[in-house]
């Protein structure tokens, strides 16, 4: 059995960000990724502006948007900015680049390495390999084994359904229509030669079959044919109950840090991964970034709770939110899981 300073279960953006920072400080780090390839995931690929100051190369970005089109049952508004509000990224390309950066820093990465068992100071994979650790980081998504090992339940989940449709799409769009999407929304997020078109809603707020059928009908009214295409779907964990547990850490979706309101989770995954690394390096470190992310996460959860009552209440809450965005009472950044705006 080989021992590592830190074993990270999951090779997504959060796990790789955590691993890179630790390795750059001379720590021996192992990333165990269950899939055969690093990177691909069901994801709309929207990156909020607050993430744009990280050291990502320009060629990673697919498209940039200085405006956001938001439509609801009763309103339409366009949020404008002098600088990009959101950029889109291909998750496969992002993952490959982050894996290459981690490997260059000295991180050991094992793919097709499904962790089956976790004990106090070691993990065992499906292949029977065992690895010891001083610190364990759960970056293994919404169905996190590390989270289950800690005995932390998961009740608050969202579901995202995504289609990647060929074509040139000029606008990034958000559609909040509670008549067909419940307390969720549909989106059109353009990429280079395709667009991510999909829908997100809180699990249990609307039947999955009805949500999918409504998405198909909504798209057809916009001359977008989805029904014959193959959808991808994923559960999104927004049930945050802590991230630091002695020498165990949960980050990203494993911690439930994705927004229950929007489903966005790349930013919080990367930042929580880096902040977990800093805390591992310095146990006395007090993370202001995590405090701000958690505060905004709680705000999103409260808005979602208010919008999960009767259909009329839901509609009024969503219309009120769009009105506040349209009039500037609430900045668009308040919808992002970032830390650029104090709340």
Image (tube, rainbow, N blue to C red):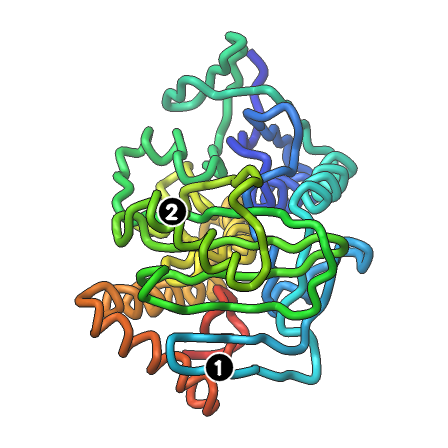
Residue 232 higher or lower than 329, as above or below: above
- Left or right: residue 310 compared with residue 180: left
Point out the tag, 2 or 1, that comes first from the N-terminus: 1
Q: Which residue is pictured at 63% across the width and 38% down the height? A: 40
Whole-percent x and y of residue 45?
61, 54
Circle 1 sits in a helix, a strand or a loop, which is it? strand
Q: Pointer 1: what residue?
A: 76
Q: How many marks?
A: 2
**Residue at (41, 64) in percent of width and height:** 291
Q: Quadrant of residue 308?
A: bottom left
Nearest to viewer (mark 2 / mark 1): 1
Q: Nearer the viewer, residue 272 or 226?
A: 226
* Circle number at residue 284: none
Task: Name the one closer to the observer, 286 or 325.
Answer: 325
Q: Which element carries disc 2, helix, strand or loop?
A: strand
Q: In the displayed structure, would residue 53 be above or below residue 140? A: below
């Amino acid at each position: 059995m080989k021992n590592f300073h830190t074993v990270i279960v999951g090779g997504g953006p959060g796990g790789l960000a955590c691993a890179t920072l630790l390795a750059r400080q001379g720590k021996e780090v192992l990333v165990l990724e269950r899939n055969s390839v690093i990177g691909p995931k069901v994801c709309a690929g929207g990156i909020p502006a607050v993430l744009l100051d990280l050291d990502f190369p320009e060629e990673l970005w697919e498209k940039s948007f200085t405006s956001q089109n938001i439509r609801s049952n009763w309103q339409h508004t366009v949020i404008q900015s002098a600088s990009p509000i959101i950029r889109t990224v291909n998750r496969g390309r992002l993952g490959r680049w982050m894996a290459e950066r981690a490997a260059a820093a000295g991180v050991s990465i094992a793919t097709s390495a499904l962790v089956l068992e976790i004990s106090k100071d070691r993990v065992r994979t499906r292949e029977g390999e065992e690895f010891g650790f001083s610190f364990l980081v759960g970056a293994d998504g919404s169905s996190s084994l590390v989270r289950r090992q800690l005995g932390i339940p998961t009740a608050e989940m969202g579901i995202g359904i995504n289609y990647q449709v060929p074509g040139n799409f000029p606008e990034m769009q958000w559609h909040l229509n509670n008549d067909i999407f419940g307390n969720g929304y549909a989106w059109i997020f353009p990429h280079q030669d395709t667009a991510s078109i999909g829908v997100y809603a809180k699990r249990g707020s609307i039947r999955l079959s009805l949500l999918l059928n409504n998405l198909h009908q909504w798209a057809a009214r916009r001359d977008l044919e989805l029904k014959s295409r193959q959808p991808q779907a994923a559960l999104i964990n927004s049930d945050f109950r802590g991230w630091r547990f002695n020498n165990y850490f949960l980050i990203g979706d494993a911690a439930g840090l994705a927004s229950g309101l929007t489903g966005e989770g790349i930013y919080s995954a990367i930042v929580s991964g880096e902040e977990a690394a800093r805390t591992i390096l310095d146990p006395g470190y007090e993370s202001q970034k995590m405090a701000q992310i958690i505060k905004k996460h709680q705000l999103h959860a409260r808005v979602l709770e208010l919008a999960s009552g009767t259909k009329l209440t839901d509609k009024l809450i969503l219309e009120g939110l769009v009105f506040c965005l349209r009039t500037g009472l609430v900045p668009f950044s308040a919808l992002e899981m970032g830390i650029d705006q104090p709340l």
